Structures are given as C-alpha cells and as structure tokens.
Amino acid sequence: MSRGCGKTPAFVRARPKAAVMRIAIVETGAPPPALKRRHGGYPQMLERLLAPFLPGASFPVFSVFEGAPPPPLAAFDGLLLTGSPAGVYEPHAWIAPLEALVRDAARAGKPQVGVCFGHQLMAQAFGGRVEKSDKGWGVGAHSYDVFAPRDWMRPFARRIACAVSHQDQVTQLPPGAVRLAGSDFCPNGALEYPGAPAVSFQMHPEFDHAFAADLIRARRERIPAALADEALASLQRETDRMRIAQWIAAFFQSA
C-alpha cells in the first residue's frame, strides 16, 4: 500500500476475501416517475454501480421514506443511504429514526456510506448542520479536490469529477469530522466521521450520463436556463464515477 494514501483509521480491518457482504440500502427518496421507469430507482442504480466491485454481495432495500422499518443492524455488514428530493431539515417522520440508525450503526462498528441526501443526513446525525445553500443549484459534473487520502481510495486521484444534483449543503461539520474532498462551490464534498467506519459523499457516482442529463431536463423549470445548459454540456466529459465506486467498495471491504 502506498504511503501516499495516508494512515488508515484504527477501525479499519481486513475482511476475509471469501466473505459475502450484505449491504442494506436505505432508500430515502425516488426519481421522478418517468425517470424511474426508464432508469430504475436509486437503489437499483447503486447496486449496478457497486456490484462489479463487490462480487456476490446482496443489496436488500429498505424504503424508509415510504414507511418501511429501518434495517436490523445485526443482519447486515453495512449501510448505504441514498439520495432524495427531501431536505434533512424537513419534518418527515422517518428522518429522526434514520438519524438514530446512523448513530447506532456507528456505535456497533457497522460501515456506512451516504450519498447526497445520505451524506447530509449522516452529517446532521453526527452533529453537523445542513442548509439550503445561497450558492443555488449544483448540477452537472463538478470537480472536487481530495484533501485527505485514505487507503481505500484506490486507484487514487488528487482530483475527481462526478455528477451532482443538489441545493442543500453541509454548512457546519460535525465535531471531529474530516473533510475528505471539496470544492469552492461545495467545500464539504466528502466527509469521514470520527470513531466510526462512516464516510459520505455529496456527489452522485450512481448517476450515469443518461440519467443525470434526463434529471436536469426534468427539472428545467426549477433550474436557471443558462445553468441547465452549462450542466448538460459538462456531462459530455468523462467523470470518475467508477473510480468512486471502487473507493466505496474498498471501504466496505476494509471496514
């Protein structure tokens, strides 16, 4: 392992290669119906993204935003929290129990990864703050600098690009949280949380070009026209979504 990848936190332990993982996908929202019919829901996108790098893994789905109970932690090797059109600060009945699940998973040493809404939910659960950003919409492919290399970031890159779709941002870090990646637009683009095998990403590695473009078109009335055009153009360049998929898989395997 390269020394340049930084020190691995104490909670990281090698998982036997023969072990088959069960990762509970906590579904917190869905794409617009027409896009869901065409591309699948967020859990399906995440499974398609990660399955090639986690052979044999299973990804049961718990649709908490529709009233399903949260996953029983003892039955799973890790948690994966999806994106959502909801805001973590909104008064949905399922948000507080989900925050409690995140804290319980941390205490139990269960690895967990959050994406977009999941990133924000984890930050809020651990004591951070999330707000609607005065910078407006983040859409299209955005680039982030990687500030804190980790051993599971393989293959490593100092700068990554990935599709995004958000207005909310983590504006105050939880106590002890480490910024793994960020940008001028989104300083807290990826976080690691203290004392727990837990990381989160504001970006959407599960969004391929076709879905990211369709989502922008579906939200044309909500996004300034010039920004939407710029975002669609940005999706023509190659992103690091598969690199980030490998990072997430390696994180689950090493935790």
Image (cartoon, rainbow, N blue to C red):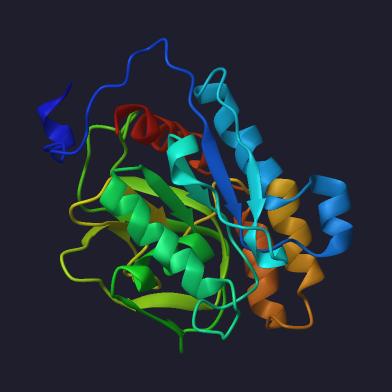
Q: Is residue 238 visible?
A: no
* Left or right of 91 in this view: 39: right
Q: Is residue 70 above or below residue 134?
A: above
List x then y, in percent, for residue 99.
43, 67
* Left or right of 90 in this view: 5: left
Name the residue at 86% across, 62% down. 33
Quarter the N terminus occupies: top left
* Left or right of 178 in this view: 131: right
- Who is closer to the viewer here, 185 or 196? 196
Residue 70, quarter of picture: bottom right
Q: Is residue 47 above or below residue 192?
A: above
Residue closest to the far bottom: 134
Name the residue at 64% across, 51% down. 62
Name the residue at 52% across, 41% down. 241
- Who is closer to the viewer here, 197 or 48? 197
- Who is closer to the viewer here, 31 or 15? 15
Q: How many marks?
A: 0
Q: Is residue 104 above or below residue 132?
A: above
List x then y, in percent, for residue 214.
78, 58
List x then y, in percent, for residue 226.
67, 78
Residue 6, quarter of picture: top left
Quarter the C terminus occupies: top left
List x then y, in percent, for residue 144.
37, 56
Q: Is residue 161 visible?
A: yes
Residue 185, quarter of picture: bottom left
* Left or right of 56 in this view: 124: left
